[in-house]
Amino acid sequence: MSEVRLSVEPRTEFGKGAARRTRRAGKIPAVLYGHGTEPRHLALPALEFARVVRENGSNAVLTLDVDNASELALTKTITVHPLKNYIEHVDLLVVKRGEKVTVDVPVVITGEPAPGGLVNQDVDTISVEVEALHIPEQFEVSIDGAEVGTQITASQVTLPSGANLLTDPEALVVAVTEPQAEATDEAAGEGEGEEAAAE
């Protein structure tokens, strides 16, 4: 994941009214915390930050230029308005180069299973401990040509070098199963056959 630089401003007003004014000015209220420092209230440029998230994912690492200094930060939590779909608030975590952080990385299923197979994805994200500047945007899991009965667990997902899996290794990520409708039809057919034989 690439490191992105953003120019941000300190916030001196707080509360809902101040947050609304910040958003009307085209900025996002944010809090930067971690490494024993006092939480710092910031205003992020809304359009630039939204682009960063689109291009780098929700675990984007930012170099924040604020008060004539630079701070490396991991995007920890993004709060989105449930109806209007704009970013309401962001929590940022101070990180140091070379430091490992705990993040949830999205799992993306690729490929098509063998004919007759139905894909069931049980896990949307996998939790890993990884160096802050080497967080993968996503984990791709291929089920291309997988037969019915195929199961892929968290331990079978390929991690980047130096990353540690924190999710239960036995957690089922994706399974290729038989479509339920067909299975039900077959069971019904077998039942009818048994009834006919009994008669």
Image (tube, rainbow, N blue to C red):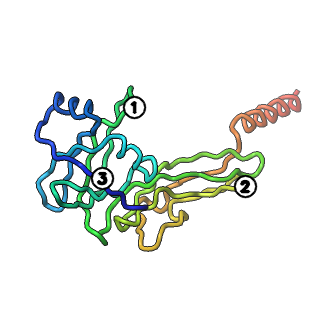
Dot 2 falls on a residue whose secondary structure is loop
Q: Is there CB contact under 8 Å for labels 3 and 1?
A: no
- The picture places residue 36, in percent across and down from the top left corner, at 13, 60
Nearer mark to the viewer, of 3 and 2: 3
Q: What numbered label is drawn on residue 6?
A: 3
Q: Residue at x 73, y 56 (%)?
A: 145
Query: Image check: 14 left or right of 179?
Result: left
Nearer mark to the viewer, of 1 and 2: 1
Q: Earlier in the sequence, mark 3 or mark 2?
A: 3
Dot 1 falls on a residue whose secondary structure is loop
Dot 3 falls on a residue whose secondary structure is strand
Residues at marks 3 and 2, CA–CA distance in whole angstroms? 47 Å
Q: Earlier in the sequence, mark 3 or mark 1?
A: 3
Q: What numbered label is drawn on residue 85?
A: 1
Q: Quadrant of the N terminus?
A: bottom left
- The picture places residue 81, in percent across and down from the top left corner, at 34, 31
Q: Nearer the viewer, residue 128 or 93?
A: 93
